[in-house]
Image (cartoon, rainbow, N blue to C red):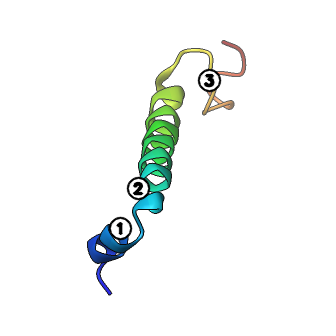
Amino acid sequence: MNFFQLLRKKKELIPLVAFMTVAATGATSFALYSPRKTDVIIDRKRNPEP
């Protein structure tokens, strides 16, 4: 059974899938954005203090 066929059969899953997609996108975006901030120290040997 295809994913879209399942969503057509069980329409109550559409809001859940939409919410989970938005949550996963937000979490991924934050995970990619936060290391670029200046308050995050990745290399402690060369830069022990900010």
Q: Give the SS element for disc 2.
A: helix
Q: Give the SS element for disc 3.
A: loop
In the image, is 5 to the left or to the right of 48? left
In the image, is 27 to the left or to the right of 29? right
Q: Amino acid at mark 3?
A: Val
2 vs 41: above or below: below
Measure how far apart labels 3 and 1 are at the Cα level: 41 Å
Q: Which sits earlier in the primary sequence, circle 3 or circle 1?
A: 1
Q: Which residue is mark 2?
A: 14
Residue 34 % position (x, y): 53, 28
What is the number of the mark on residue 7?
1
Q: Please report contact status of discs 2 and 1: CB closer than 8 Å, yes or no.
A: yes
Identified at 61% across, 33% down, the residue is: 42
Q: Amino acid at mark 2?
A: Ile
Q: Which residue is mark 3?
A: 40
Q: In front of the other: label 3 or label 2?
A: 2
Q: Amino acid at mark 1?
A: Leu
Q: Quadrant of the C terminus?
A: top right
Identified at 43% across, 36% down, the residue is: 29
Identified at 47% across, 36% down, the residue is: 26
Q: Give the SS element for disc 1.
A: helix
